[in-house]
Amino acid sequence: MATEREVRKVALAFSGGLDTSVAVPWIRETYGADVVAVAVDVGQGDVDLEAIEERARAAGAVACHVIDVREDFVENFVWPTLRAGAVYGRKYLLGTAMARPIIAREVVRVARREGCDALAHGCTGKGNDQVRFELTFGRLAPDLAVIAPWREWDIRGRADAEAYGRRVGVP
């Protein structure tokens, strides 16, 4: 569990995918907390932001904030990273790695505005995304609990997540 103290309202980094969609009802069931979804547009391009908001509400979020940080992301994250030559293996631009801190920053900002007492993400642990989110959360909001469903729940893969989603009515 995230903390010994009571969690009443959670700001969740929300992509609209399976993992974050089932995280909404799981957090509600497990913590008895309201969930505020935070979808951050870093220029993914193939994401329907209106559909993300609808999906968050259909999953049970009490609110969904869709935030456009594209200009800030390019100016303050992408260009400095490119100037530093931070390209993995000289061929892989670390786009996801660059995006996680700005997404986490926006989750913290929404959490503060909404009066949340916890932060959450849907990172599976297959890569370093949990670390990227949680280092940023810890730096910007050390007073808020962090919930990482993939470290807590019994869901072990996509089939489990889909079955859970069907059981709790996530479209």
Image (tube, grey):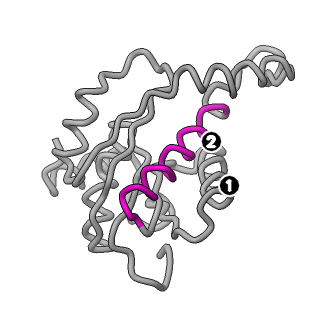
Span of residues in magenta: 98-116
| Precedes in sequence: disc 1 or disc 2 | 2
Under mark 2, the amino acid is Pro
Q: Position of residue 86 (x, y in %)?
A: 82, 24
The local secondary structure at tag 2 comes to helix
Contact between labelled residues 2 and 1, with CB atoms less than 8 Å apart: yes
Give the spatial CA distance, label 1 vs label 2: 8 Å
Dot 2 corresponds to which residue? 101
Residue 107 part of the magenta segment:
yes
**Could you tell me which residue is drawn at 22 percent across and 54 percent down?**
62
Q: Quadrant of residue 45?
A: top left
Quarter placement of the C terminus: top left
**Could you tell me which residue is drawn at 40 percent across and 52 percent down?**
12
Query: In the displayed image of the protein, which residue is found farthest to the front?
Result: 113
Q: Position of residue 109 (x, y in %)?
A: 49, 50
| Front in this rendered view, residue 115 or 4 | 115
